[in-house]
Image (tube, rainbow, N blue to C red):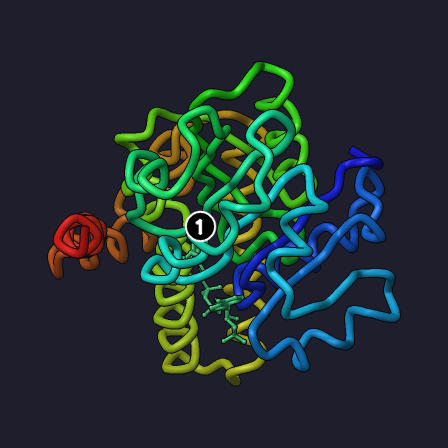
Amino acid sequence: MKDLKIAIIGCGNLGSSIVNGLLDSEDFDVKNLTVTKRRPESLFYLQPLGITVTADNLRAANEADLVILGVKPFNVAEILDELKPVLNPEKQAIISLATGISLDEMYLHLAPTTVVFRAMPNIAADIKESITCICGENATPEMEDRVKALFNCVGTTLFIEEHLMEGATVLGACGIAFVLRFMRAMTQGGIQIGFGAETANTIVNQTVKGAAELILQKGIHPEAAIDKVTTPKGCTIVGLNEMEHHGFSAAMVRGVLASFNKIDRSQ
Ligand SMILES: NC(=O)c1ccc[n+]([C@@H]2O[C@H](COP(=O)([O-])OP(=O)(O)OC[C@H]3O[C@@H](n4cnc5c(N)ncnc54)[C@H](OP(=O)(O)O)[C@@H]3O)[C@@H](O)[C@H]2O)c1
């Protein structure tokens, strides 16, 4: 990992989250990182940290072992056409972060032997807590290990089949927003029962963190943990059932499906 040269072509919100995670990682040397934007000024603060910041996509891609595409989905085709003359399919791999752009669509703009991955991290990469779902084509196990090691620097990784990548976008990337909206609603409830906003936020944030850690560390099903909290005739089950009467679980499932259908329609 230390010698791996990485270019992030189109370093916007998600790209910057990955940069922040890598900056904080002992396994990666940020001197080997180059980030690009058409207007790179907003990234110049990274230069004193040893990261190369440039608008020159060709130079950045040419020198990299792993070329990460952080541009919007509608920019992927033009970027691949721009980069193709300098790419070396024998040595490099392309990793696209773009939602809804398939491997086949990318191969329309690449040599057939090129190693191509799709990766779907989320903005928790910023604090090395992303879940990154990955699929790829033409990769050797060593190349897969490299890509896994890269995204392990910013959280946890999972290799999945390509047909599940849109689902991964919804659960992993949109999912952050779903959970945050849930947290906001819980905070609002807390304010109504008497807490100041800041105190309510503190309680909700740590409660959500604790719930996630509990499930992760103990490896138990959420409902099994819920059973431990719901005293018969108690206040927790009354609150939970009231939420379900108002469609809590149904709203979440319908939201997940709506996001999924939206990605499908835009393909
Ligand atoms: N945000 C998320 O949580 C998330 C999660 C998973 C996947 N994704 C995917 O990640 C990608 C990026 O999303 P984002 O939210 O980070 O978007 P974003 O903030 O708009 O970043 C895209 C960046 O690409 C740059 N860019 C555009 N054209 C370029 C070009 N020709 N050469 C170099 N840079 C160029 C833009 O900067 P300039 O205008 O200065 O060039 C911009 O900073 C999308 O494909 C999205 O589907 C996002």
**Residue pointed to by mark 1:** 80
Give the left or right position of residue 51, taking residue 194 as reference. right
Q: Residue at x 52, y 21 (%)?
A: 139
Q: Residue 79, how many percent across, how many down?
A: 45, 57
Q: Is residue 88 above or below residue 54?
A: above
Residue 116 visible in the snapshot = yes
Residue at screen point 35% across, 47% down: 169
Q: Is residue 179 visible from the viewing direction of this image?
A: no
Task: Name which residue lies at 47% across and 40% down.
Answer: 119
Q: Nearer the viewer, residue 54 or 11?
A: 54
Tell whether 241 sits left or right of 185. Answer: left
Q: How many marks?
A: 1
- Is 230 on the left or on the right of 130, as rendered? left
Q: Position of residue 243 (x, y in %)?
A: 21, 58
As shown in the figure, which amino acid type bears the numbered disc 1?
Leu
- Name the residue nearer the viewer: 155 or 55: 55
Quarter of the image with the N terminus in it: top right
Q: Is residue 184 above or below residue 58?
A: below
69 to the left or right of 151: left
Label 1 neighbour load within 10 Å: few <14, some 14-19, many 20+: some
Q: Quadrant of residue 161?
A: top left
Q: Position of residue 160 (x, y in %)?
A: 39, 26
- Identify whether 48 is placed above or below 65: below
| Residue at image point 69% right, 44% down | 64
Q: Is mark 1 within 8 Å of ligand 1?
A: no
